[in-house]
């Protein structure tokens, strides 16, 4: 008798093999993820630490300062 992980794997493998519309949807999902994580990161999220600080020590000090400062209460 096959183990539970093997039967679950076989179930999903057979399901993905039988897909027709699903393959197209998965391709669209992958393309959207590539756009979101690769393209948007390049253009809209520049490397703040690399551009504003010269050394790793300065970057580390800035990060430590930002993480350890007290929270500002909202009034």
Image (spheres, rainbow, N blue to C red):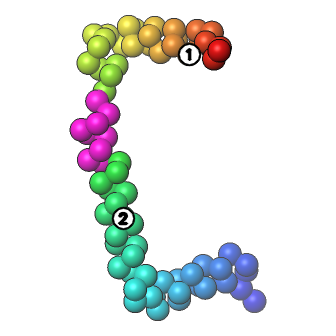
Q: Are marks 2 and 1 in contact (CB under 8 Å)?
A: no
Instruction: Report helix, strand or loop for mark 2.
Output: helix
Q: Name, please, the residue furthest toward the bottom.
A: 18
Kindly identify the residue that appears in the image at 51 percent across and 8 percent down: 65
* Alpha carbon distance from label 2 to label 1: 34 Å
- The structure residue drawn at horizontal position 34% and vertical position 70%, both measured from the top left corner, is 28
Please tell me which residue is depicted at 58% across the width and 9% down the height of the picture: 69
Earlier-in-chain disc, 2 versus 1: 2
Q: Return the x and y of residue 68 as percentages of the image width and height.
A: 59, 11
**Left or right of 57 in this view: 16:** right
Looking at the rendering, which quadrant does residue 50 occupy? top left
Q: For the magenta stretch, what is the residue range?
A: 38-46
Task: Judge the density around disc 2: few (<14), some (14-19), many (≥20) Cα neighbours within 10 Å.
Answer: few
In the rendered structure, does residue 4 fall within the stretch colored magenta?
A: no
The residue tagged 2 is: 30
Q: What residue is pinned by disc 1? A: 67
Residue extending farthest front: 75
Location of residue 18 in the rendering, given as x and y in whole percent from the top left corner: 46, 92
Horizontal and vertical percent position of residue 67 = 56, 16
Kindly state the secondary structure of the residue where label 1 is placed: helix
Specify whether 43 is left or right of 22: left
User: 40 above or below 47?
Assistant: below
Q: Position of residue 59 (x, y in %)?
A: 39, 13
The answer to whether residue 39 is magenta is yes
């Amino acid at each position: 008798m096959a183990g539970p992980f093997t039967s679950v794997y076989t179930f999903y493998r057979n399901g993905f093999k039988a897909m027709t519309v699903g393959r197209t949807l998965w391709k669209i999902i992958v393309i959207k993820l590539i756009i979101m994580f690769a393209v948007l990161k390049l253009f809209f999220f520049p490397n703040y630490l690399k551009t504003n600080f010269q050394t790793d020590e300065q970057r580390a000090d800035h990060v430590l300062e930002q993480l350890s400062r007290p929270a500002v209460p909202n009034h």
